Image (tube, helix red, strand yellow):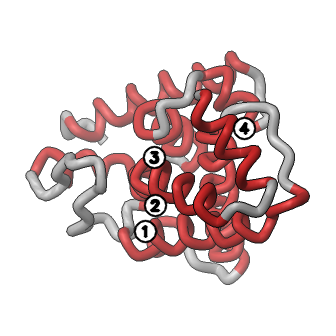
Amino acid sequence: MIEDELLKLRFKAGRIDALQRIYEKYRDYLLTLAMAMVNDAATAEDVVHDAFVAFAQSGARFRLRGSLRAYLATCVVNRIRDRMRARRRQGQALDEEMTLESDFDPPDGRILSDERSRLVGRALARLPEEQRETIALHLNGQLKFREIARLQNIPLTTVRGRYRHGIEKLRSILNGRL
């Protein structure tokens, strides 16, 4: 965390090497998070790229007292939400926009090509958006429920409920009951 504080100061001062280090440090984490939410490699990469471009442009006006990792995760999640809203306005259903199978090999070394991972990806795609986002933020984004509640601007009990119900629904889907 000390490194992040130094990176934030150097980034605010306009140091390009700080931006580069932030990108190198968090790119894989953010790609994994985005992939868990959208289950499409191209969309995940686009969202992370867009988030970093916006972040880079914030430069001197950038102010952050909290976690850089949580801030960047929030940026990515908000961009995903914006894309989903835009697609819904265009009349495209969520199921149509999400690729249910992916050949994405996440950067942290986990391999999604085995059958279990494909099944979980398909099952996650069938969850309601709120439950999928909560599960992805907690498991892939490694955010605590309190952080998720702050990010989603909802009560902590709602986050816990979405997570619990989402996990139960995932179990049902994977056990062939849904």
Q: Which of the two marks, 1 or 3, is nearer to us in this view? A: 1
Q: Disc 4 or disc 3, which is closer to the eye?
A: 4
- Residue where numbered disc 2 is placed: 38
Q: Residue at x 71, y 45 (%)?
A: 8
Determine which of the numbered discs, if any, sits on residue 151 in the image: 4
Helix, strand or loop status at disc 4: helix
Nearer-N-terminus badge (4/1): 1
Query: Which element type, helix, strand or loop, lies under badge 2?
Result: helix
Question: Would you say the residues marked 2 and 4 are in contact, meaning their CB atoms lie under 8 Å apart?
Answer: no
Quadrant holding the C terminus = top left
Badge 1 density bin: few <14, some 14–19, many ≥20, Cα 10 Å: some
In depth, the one of 123 and 75 nearer the eye is 75
Contact between marks 2 and 1 (CB within 8 A): the answer is: yes
Q: Is residue 157 above or below residue 174?
A: above
N-terminal label among 2 and 1: 2
How far, Cα to Cα, is label 2 from label 3? 12 Å
Give the amino acid type for the residue marked by disc 2 in the picture: Val
Residue 127: mark = 3
Q: CA distance from mark 4 to mark 3?
A: 20 Å
Foreground disc of the pair 2, 1? 2
Element under disc 1: loop
Q: Answer above or below: position of 132 versus 61.
A: above
Amino acid bearing label 4: Leu
Identify the amino acid type marked 3: Leu
Residue at 29% in and 40% down:
173
Between discs 1 and 3, the one toward the N terminus? 1
Q: What SS does tag 3 mark?
A: loop
Q: Quick check: 122 left or right of 33?
A: left
Q: What's the mark number on residue 98?
A: 1
Q: Position of residue 10 (x, y in %)?
A: 72, 50
